[in-house]
Image (tube, rainbow, N blue to C red):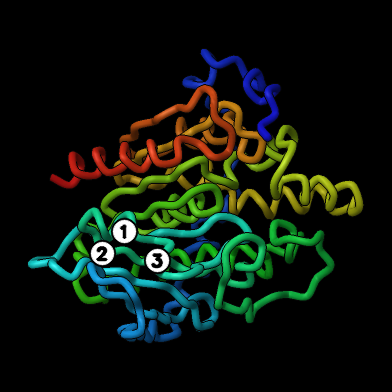
Amino acid sequence: MSNPEMFTEIAVEQLENYRPKLVPPVDLHDFWTATLAAAQEFPLNVEAKLVRDTPLRTVDVYDVTFAGFGGHPIKAWYLVPRDRAELLPTIVEYVGYGGGRGLPHEWLYWSSAGHPHLIMDTRGQGSAWRTGDTADLGASGRPHVPGFLTDGLPDRDHYYYRRLFTDAVRAVEAAAQLPGADPARLVTTGTSQGGALALVAASLRTDVAATMPNVPFLCHIKRSTQVATAGPFPELVTWCHTHHRLVDQAFATLAYFDVAILARDARCPAHFGVALRDEICPPSGVYACVNHYGGTKEVLTYEWNGHEGGQAHHLAAQSAWLAEILS
């Protein structure tokens, strides 16, 4: 249930101009350049196997595997409209915290709307609310709060999201190689953690045509940790409560993964969804990202919604925006 206090976390009229000072690490770009270059040392090895045992009749379903961080195998589903006659704008979607790629028939919206649709599985997740099939082979084994947000802290090189962000970037590269995809019109999207990954891919790659992050996670991390009352950010509160001497080092590490910082390098058009009663990804964190975003953007704000955002209404709005942007 949404916390009504989130509605007044920052006065509504101030959110549109909320642009806090976010200081990037001096070697931020070097860190990500080196991380992605290391991933490129492993062949992408995209495999797409047609799934024949499916009740779906209007889409072809492919079981996809590609090499992510460290060359680790990452699973995905790829759904393609059967009546396609040309290369079409292709959606690359990422999953929210705790979920995995699930089952193909859970993802019919975008392919039914005429778009090839790649859904990346999330390493190590996929047991909280939707099934997953990808192991996190690079886990550091460091003590952490149950969940993923503190896994590997305070070591930036072994932090969980270094691996997952790299997977997200590689997923775009993999999508460009799939049958029916248009490499010139790759669009990233997702909700919550998925929205963060959509922004990361758009920020760290130059070939993303558009991005549609919905209530994105990992934005203005310190502020969001201070005010979120549910979801993953309280995991970080617990970690800091326990590891007193490592708090400053942890937040210095998290600056490399703060999406509001990374998104300043994005240049493609963006369509944001924000919910003003969101107790999991507070609106101030999301608006910090919106207002620092490096490209053109459109924002839909849901005044009376929590982390669920605009749901089906928002999908329809995304479709209309995408049709206009890619026309």
Asked which quadrant contains residue 70, the reply is bottom right
Q: Amino acid at mark 2?
A: Pro
Q: Secondary structure at mark 1?
A: strand
Query: Between tags 3 and 2, which lies in front?
Result: 3
Closest to the observer, 310 or 276: 310
Task: State which quarter of the image contains the C terminus.
Answer: top left
Residue carrying label 3: 105
Residue 305 x/y as whole percent = 54, 29
Labels 3 and 1: the sequence-earlier one = 1
Residue shown at 53% from the left, 21% from the top: 15
Q: CA distance from mark 3 to mark 1?
A: 16 Å
Residue shown at 66% from the left, 52% from the top: 254
- How many callouts does the rendering have? 3
Residue 49 x/y as whole percent = 33, 86
Q: CA distance from mark 3 to mark 2?
A: 14 Å
Closest to the observer, 161 or 262: 161
Q: Secondary structure at mark 3?
A: helix
Residue carrying label 2: 116
Circle 1: is it few (<14), some (14-19), or many (20+) Cα within 10 Å? many
Closest to the observer, 161 or 300: 300
Task: State which quarter of the image contains the N terminus.
Answer: top right
Residue shown at 61% from the left, 33% from the top: 278
